[in-house]
Amino acid sequence: MSREEAPSPRRSEPAEAGAGRLPAEPRWVVVLGVLYVASYLSAVLVASGQADRIVRIASATGASLLIGGYCAWCGLRTRHEERVWRLLLAAAGGTATLGSAIALAYVVARGAPPANISLVDLGYFLTPLLSLCAIIVLPTDAAGRGPEPTDRHRHHRWRLVIVLDGLLITGSATLLCWSAALRPIVEARSSGLSPYLVVRFSINVLIVVLLLLVACFRRARDPQTQALLTVSFVAFGVAQWLALTKVATPDQFFGFGVTTAYIIGCVILGLAVGRHPSRAGPAAARPELANLWPRLLLPYLPLVMLLGLSAARIVTGAALIRNEIGFTLVLVCLVIVRQLITALDNVRLLSRVRAGQRQLRHLAYHDALTGLPNRARLNEHLAAALTRRTGGLALLMCDLDDFKAVNDTLGHDAGDELLRATAGRLLECVGPPNLVARLGGDEFAVLVEDPSDDPDVIGARIGARMTDPVALNGEDRVVHVSVGVARLTQGEAAVPATLLRRADAAMYATKRSRKAASSRPPAAEEGPPTRGRRLRQAGRPRRGHMSRGP
């Protein structure tokens, strides 16, 4: 290859829609995050008093500024739906930076953050709202199609189960957070509790619940991004809960634990925002069982934790709140309704599975064109008949003559119609408990088990019935049949394959004798041309040929 033809090393695969120029793995975010946390911890250990408070507030402000700017930078370098949620998180980081900056200014100027509701609360109130909007517009795909829309009742039940699961997760998680975290704080510090802080914590819990719902019932474009987002908002929730425990204290918003958890959450959020969007575009299809265990367990996990908390309070003698008991009973009723719907679906599914198994068995043992038993069913039935027989047994092999000529002259549709007509005529000539089967092509078999039926009589009946014309494509056509009979007398040992070979040999002997008879010139006949003479001159015998095997 010449130098002009050599590909340029700068060329790369075209960037996917929404990918932009983000790094595939933002390792440098981890390095900067670790350095920032280490610097913050070092400064907190060195500083004391007012300087310690300023360091903590300044560190939270810097973390908010950095994560907001990084989200904006990543959002501007992506396209389509991957941009929107990053820019919303950038706006959330901006409002958090505004609130922290105002609090820092108060501490520097007056020695303490504002005690009453102020712009600090407003900034912190807008932050979770914008974050919630970002999670709502996070690109996801359907985790599964669910039942077909044509099955209206099952489709409606499937949607009802999803709604019930969402109510269970949201209600249980909300009640658990209220009972375990918020209610003790509200009862102990009701005088100095900031309503904005309570709302902020509640919205953060809602964000985590929403991410869990997405993990169960949707498929994220990048599951690792979704997991990092969940962990980051859990860290933010821990920071807000710690802030609630510091109500009416100088460290309400910027205690050591609050600031540390917040900075760690910002670092993890940076990892989520900086991840390269999925190169496969929409999430690649995963097995249906990939999300089975989360879908099964997650709706019940918060409720089990809530019931465990209630049981612990009963054991310790703590008072139970009537409203919480009533709400818990409502959640238990939702679980019962969901289980009833699931049980109904399982019963119907089991019925469909059994019907499908019966249909598969029928398809496996029957010919699709004629509906007759196939070779596998004949072999199975013949083996059983040889095992349980108490008398004689006979097998007739039937083969259509000149079937290929019908296919070649009239088409394969006419050939299929001839095979169906032949199957119907064989069933007319053979009664139960005898078995008629199609072996394939133009070959049929008749297993005679009834000792009162004479195989020769049945063969003659079949030959006579097949002499009647068959209407194919508007044309009457006569197709002859060659019948071979193989008998098995009482006490004679044989296997299915042996009996089949003997019947097949007898059938081919019939076919050879027919060809030999048709090759001889017809004898001259005197008298007027009768109908029988015309048929014989046309090559149509009055009855089918039949040979008997040993």
Image: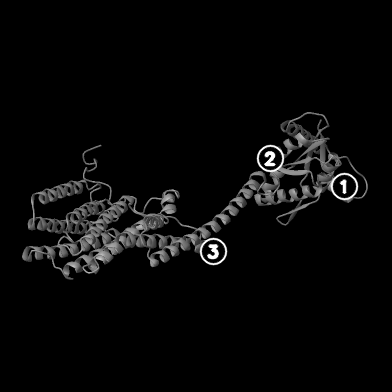
Residue 144, image x and y in percent? 44, 55
Say left or right for 146 vs 15: right
Under tag 1, what secondary structure?
helix
Outermost residue on the front side: it is 317
Estimate the spatial distance between the alpha carbons at disc 1 and disc 3, rounded to whole Å. 68 Å
Q: Label 3 amino acid?
A: His
From the viewer's side, name the closer residue of 76 and 57.
Answer: 57
Residue 546, image x and y in percent? 82, 38
Residue 70, image x and y in percent? 19, 56
Residue pointed to by mark 1? 533
Q: Is residue 449 visible?
A: yes
Residue pointed to by mark 3? 153
Residue 40, image x and y in percent? 13, 51
Whether residues under marks 1 and 3 lie with C-beta atoms below 8 angstroms apart, the answer is no
Q: Which mark is residue 169?
A: none
Outermost residue on the left side: it is 109
Q: Label 1 amino acid?
A: Arg
Q: Label 2 amino acid?
A: Arg
At 92% from the left and 50% from the top, the residue drawn is: 528
Estimate the spatial distance between the alpha carbons at disc 2 and disc 3, rounded to whole Å. 41 Å
Image quadrant in which the N terminus is located = top left
Estimate the spatial distance between the alpha carbons at disc 2 and disc 1, rounded to whole Å. 39 Å
Return the disc, 2 or 3, that comes first in the chain's sequence: 3
Task: Please tell me how crowded label 3 is: few (under 14), some (14-19), or many (20+) other residues with Cα within 10 Å.
Answer: few
Q: Which mark is residue 375?
A: 2
